[in-house]
Image (tube, rainbow, N blue to C red):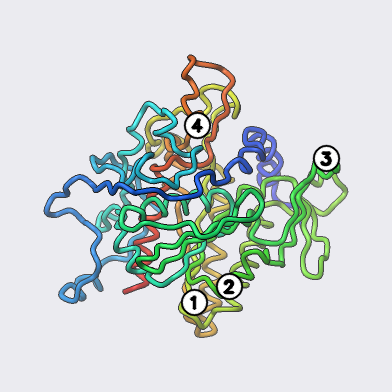
Amino acid sequence: MGKPQNQTKIIRKLTPCVLYTLIPLALLHYYTYISPHCYNQIAHKRLEKTADSDSITPPVQGKAAELKNQPRCDYSDGHWVQTTAKPLYNGTSCGTIKWAQNCMVNGRPDTGYLYWQWQPEDNRCPAPLFDASVFLEIIKNKHIAFIGDSLARNQLESLICLLSTASKPELVYQGGDDLKFRRWVFYEYNVTLSSLWSQYLVKGTDRNQSEGIDHNALYLDTPNEKWASELDKIDIVVFHNGHWFVQKAIYYGEGNQFLGCNFPQESNCTELNFYDAFRMALRTSLKEVTRKFYKSDKTVVVATFTLAHFEGDWDKFGTCMKTEPYKEGDVEMQDLEKNMRKAAIEEVATAVKDVKDVGGGLRIEALDVTKLTFLRPDGHPGPYMFPNPFANGKKEGVMNDCMHWCLPGPIDTWNAILLELMKRWKK
């Protein structure tokens, strides 16, 4: 493979050094689910809306023509606006929140981060709001699986809390290394939600420092069998990954042919940058679903890349202590986010075309959350991934999570937009 341009080379070389010295692998592994069972849910309703508010309701026959003429909303571009609407759940009403993301219970003192909603730039499109009953009715008798890394699991856990305001889930399975595979059922609607861990989506082995192996090995043309073998049982797939690709890795292609590595300065190998590796892994995954189900009415959603907001050493005070969203122009999105998002958007577009070319019915769509999360440095647990980290006063040495998202928090908006996509499919 030819050498990338200088700018891409600089980004590739610096990103693992700068970004992932701040985000150790321990933080990604740290996020295994702790609370295994739901307990009684206390439904928290939004504040009373004005008569002209855009609440989410199921389409009714009398409004069919009106719904048909509604604009196709683009939620990828917009800005955050303050709201008085309370979150639909909190740190005590949802019993499935992983303790390291339960910012409220862990003592985070500010609550302003909870009172923002995403407003699309197209003013004809209302802010996406979540309605648990509508969501459950749309996916009645269906199975949704979130496949990817700990951010995929983060989104699933948000969705479980949101849906718990309308129906109680039951944890029916947990297994795998660190219990990274889980399944819940909402029996009232016969709805199943699953978490399937697959940080690369393709077959891969992690580095093993104890054995002197300091890099991952990825087989970019081979889907990870742990999720691929479950496809027959799944109606809606949500892929979300990307962060693990910036680590040192060697790559293999068809027939285990060696393709290259992303650290040629340390090894005598052909250079393959991690952007291309991520793209190839996602392409393989989409082709696997398309190959099996292009004639079906199943759905694949690809969530785009979201970057962490570390502003210092991961184990120092003040690393991510923002309390408000960024405003447009406050910061500039870097090439890492842009390139990873671009790869996902383009691979989704290619997969959609492939399905159309063969007359298939499989739906494939991007859940473009890059910008809306890029603007929310205030939505992470930070030091409140632990209970009351400053109970004995301020301390300089404290572990911070500036990658995952507080529950409740901005990540709930991902599922509100997912609902809007699902309503569009239903129409």
Q: Residue furthest right?
A: 268
Assign a secondary structure to mark 1.
loop
Q: Earlier in the sequence, mark 1 or mark 2?
A: 2
Q: Nearer the viewer's eye, disc 1 or disc 3?
A: 3
What's the residue type where badge 2 is placed? Val
Q: Position of residue 88 (x, y in %)?
A: 30, 47
Q: Earlier in the sequence, mark 1 or mark 4?
A: 1
The residue singled out by tag 4 in the image is 382
Q: Position of residue 173 (x, y in %)?
A: 54, 59
Q: Nearer the viewer's eye, disc 1 or disc 4?
A: 4
Name the image quarter holding residue 326: top left
Whether residue 303 is visible here, answered yes or no, is yes
Tell me whether the residue at label 1 lies in contact with that at label 3, contact meaning CB atoms closer than 8 angstroms. Answer: no
What's the residue type where badge 3 is placed? Ser
Q: Earlier in the sequence, mark 2 or mark 4?
A: 2
The residue singled out by tag 3 in the image is 210
Category of crowding for the residue at label 4, using alpha-carbon neighbours closer than 10 angstroms: few (below 14), some (14–19), many (at least 20): many
Q: Position of residue 18 (x, y in %)?
A: 65, 34
Assign a secondary structure to mark 3.
helix
Q: Nearer the viewer's eye, disc 2 or disc 3?
A: 3
The residue singled out by tag 2 in the image is 289
Assign a secondary structure to mark 4.
loop
Residue closer to the observer: 104 or 6: 104
Tell me whether the residue at label 1 lies in contact with that at label 2, contact meaning CB atoms closer than 8 angstroms. Answer: yes
The residue singled out by tag 1 in the image is 362
Task: Decide if residue 77 is on the left or right side of residue 364.
Answer: left
Question: Cα distance, mark 1 to mark 3?
Answer: 44 Å
Task: Decide if residue 360 is on the left or right side of residue 426.
Answer: right
Assign a secondary structure to mark 2.
helix
Q: Residue at x 47, y 39 (%)?
A: 101
